[in-house]
Image (cartoon, rainbow, N blue to C red):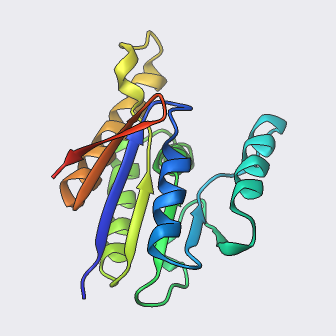
Amino acid sequence: MSARIIMVTGGQRSGKSVFAENMALRLAEHPVYLATAQILDDEMRRRVEAHRERRRERWRNVESPLMIAGTQLADGEVVLIDCLTIWASNWFFKLGEDTDAALAEMKAQLDLLFGRPLTYIIVTNEIGLGGVSENAMRRQFTDLQGAINQYVASLAHEVYLTVSGIPVKIKP
């Protein structure tokens, strides 16, 4: 058995996480929720608490802000990674805003992770749809996010775009 990769993308608050969580629960009685967020302020704390409240006891929660390939997982598990955008920002800032180094680290981690026979549902954001930022750092991060999204989408068996709570299958 090889990895099955499903990518769920869309704008902020588009319904990505709820769609991905429901998919994971259809595929497994007790899926793994691999959270990449770091709680750095009250607003992020509220978001994380809302996600935790929605998931409750059916999920096995794992927090990994950087080294996701080291996560203890069993063959055949369903793993929801939420989210690729937060994970990219963690690498971006850890590596001094070096997009090339961050992209290389992320690809290496994903390649190791995807070498395991599990089902992966990966939530990410489409942050480049709103125009080009005047801020150089934001442009660099948008480039990183676009590159890692393209990488995951190229490996994914299925890709969904959520718009206003409506998932649209865009691959295959």
Q: Name the residue located 41 percent from the left edge and 50 percent from the top edge.
A: 102
Q: Name the residue located 30 percent from the left edge and 80 percent from the top edge.
A: 115
Work out whether residue 74 or residue 167 is closer to the camera in this orientation and state it: 167
Asked if 92 appears above or below 155 in the picture, the reply is above
Q: Is residue 95 visible?
A: no
Quadrant of image for the N terminus = bottom left
Q: Position of residue 124 (x, y in %)?
A: 44, 45
Q: Position of residue 117 (x, y in %)?
A: 33, 84
Q: Report whether 109 appears left or right of 64.
A: left
Q: Name the residue located 56 percent from the left edge and 49 percent from the top edge.
A: 18
Q: Position of residue 35 (x, y in %)?
A: 61, 60
Write down the quadrant of residue 166 in the picture.
Answer: top left
Q: Residue furthest left?
A: 172
Write down the quadrant of residue 58 in the picture.
Answer: bottom right
Work out whether residue 43 or residue 87 is closer to the camera in this orientation and state it: 43
Q: Is residue 75 visible?
A: yes
Write down the quadrant of residue 145 in the picture.
Answer: top left
Q: Name the residue located 25 percent from the left edge and 57 percent from the top edge.
A: 158
